[in-house]
Amino acid sequence: MSVCEDSLLCNFPKCRAKLTGFAWVTACSHAFCDQHGSGEFSRSPAICPACSSALSGKLDIVRTELTPSEEYKAMVLAGLRPETVLDISGRALAFWTYQVQQERLFQEYSLSRAEGQVKQMEKLLSQQSQSRELELSSMRQEISSLKKVMEDYKRKYSEVSERLMERNRQYQKLQGLYDALRLRNMVGDREAARGAPAQFSTGAGKPPSPGGSPPFLGCDGDRLFSSLDHDGAKSFFQFSSPPRDPARAFTKKH
């Protein structure tokens, strides 16, 4: 409430409502709304909720109408001496001045308290801002280090990929050579299998020449000679063809 306002506020803590209609006024210069005044001053002994003063006198608490009628205004001070009227008016104005001063002090207290809270909030905000800046700086450094690690991984991945491609090319080349050698061996084996009877043929299938020895009956010449090694063949022909006797040859000449 400012000084220019034409109404008072309830002095009950946490109420601060604008006084209208009826109000409770105390001898300790406090005013309360009709709701809180009726609730607080119905007890005995009565205690002022604003300053905790005891209100035991008959006129220490008065319930007054804030907007009295014209008849009440005409009769309330009628018949009183001027000095009494002035005394009553002075006390009423002093009550109003005290309320205005109390409201000003309350507003100043509220302002100082709000300024203190604002300073605390600014300090807290500054601390949080510094903390966020530090966190942001650390996160930037971490991002930079992670980028370097990622670049290293990319480089290693590229090297491994190139080596893998080179190994694949070598493998394909070796696979081609292996397939070519395998095909060549298969063709050589087939040709060898086809040409083997002609190389080791003994003439068993041919008709006997005139004057020659008859062929071996019931025996395959190929299998016979293939089962003999070099020494065995030599020994076989040695036993089949015995050497001539030189003495007999000489006797026939004579």
Image (cartoon, rainbow, N blue to C red):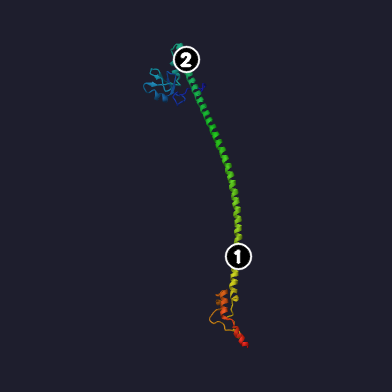
Tell me: residue 109, above or below residue 169: above
Residue identified by numbered label 2? 90
Between 108 and 165, the one lying in front of the other is: 165
* Secondary element type, mark 1: helix
Please report the residue visible at 59 percent of the width from the left and 64 percent of the height from the top.
179
Q: Where in the figure is residue 55, as x and y percent of width and height?
A: 39, 19
Q: Quadrant of residue 24?
A: top left
Which is nearer the N-term, disc 2 or disc 1? 2
Please report the residue visible at 46 percent of the width from the left and 11 percent of the height from the top.
83
Q: Crowding near pointer 2: few (<14 within 10 Å), some, many (20+)?
A: few
Q: Is residue 208 left or right of residue 34?
A: right
* Secondary element type, mark 2: helix
Residue 83 seen: yes
Tell me: residue 12, above or below residue 168: above
| Residue at far bottom of view | 254
Tell me: residue 223, above or below residue 84: below
Residue identified by numbered label 1? 181
* Amino acid at dot 2: Gly
